[in-house]
Image (cartoon, rainbow, N blue to C red):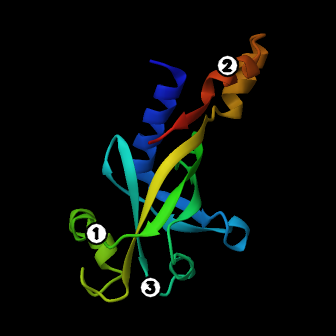
Amino acid sequence: MSKETDLTAKFWKALKTDRTVMLGLRDVEGGHCQPMTALMESEQGGPLWIFTSADCDMVAALDRERDAVMHFSSKGHDLFAEIDGRLRIDNDRQAIDGLWSPFVAAWFTGKTDPTLRLLRFDPEHARIWRNESSLFAGMKLMLGQDPKRDYRNKVAEVSLH
């Protein structure tokens, strides 16, 4: 398995469980990002879905599909990613039904809530970093090994489409 394949698989697995991302539009407010919850239909990637409200400032800026950036950090801070892609409003009924959960329901009066907006993020390219703890790197130094040499295998630029 290549480094790119390994890191991509680790990224999708971490995103499926951690789900909190920072999402921004490249050409709006200098790419300012805000926290959102990204949901996946498939473990192999594909579009990411974000439930939000019509009064969200990002929704107001999505008069058309736009370039977007998503930042991700796993809960254990052992994996980081910056994902480039395209973002649009897509109130796909099938996606809403399939991704609906008690956590989403807490924010809306139901699946037909007039304020509900479903955003679709189509990832295109990512930079993924796997982080080893400084303790591990320190142990390598104590054993006379160079931790930077191993770090090269922990960074990848990958295509996600």
- Mark in front: 2 vs 3: 3
- Marks 3 and 1, how far apart at CA: 15 Å
In the rendered image, the vertical position of residue 1 relative to residue 46, given as above or below: above
Residue type at tag 3: Ala
- Marks 2 and 3, how far apart at CA: 46 Å
Marks 3/1 in contact by CB < 8 Å: the verdict is: no
Q: Residue at 55% across / 43% down in the picture?
A: 125
Mark toward the start of the polypeptide (2 vs 3): 3
| Label 1 Cα neighbours within 10 Å, binned few <14 / some 14-19 / many ≥20 | few
Q: Which residue is mark 3?
A: 54
Locate the C terminus by quadrant: top left
Locate the N terminus by quadrant: top left
Residue type at tag 2: Asp
- Specify the farthest residue to the front: 64
Q: Which mark is residue 37?
A: none
Q: What x and y, as percent, mark residue 107?
A: 36, 81
Mark toward the start of the polypeptide (2 vs 1): 1
Q: What x and y, as percent, mark residue 63?
A: 51, 78
Q: Which mark is residue 150?
A: 2
Q: Residue at 38% across / 78% down in the picture?
A: 117
Q: Residue at 67% across / 67% down in the picture?
A: 27
Camera-side residue of 120 and 100: 120
Q: Which mark is residue 92?
A: 1
| 149 with respect to 102 (left or right) | right
Residue type at tag 1: Asp
Quadrant of the rendered image containing residue 81: top right
Mark toward the start of the polypeptide (3 vs 1): 3
| 14 with respect to 68 (left or right) | left
> In the structure shown, which secondary structural element does the residue marked by tag 2 occupy?
helix
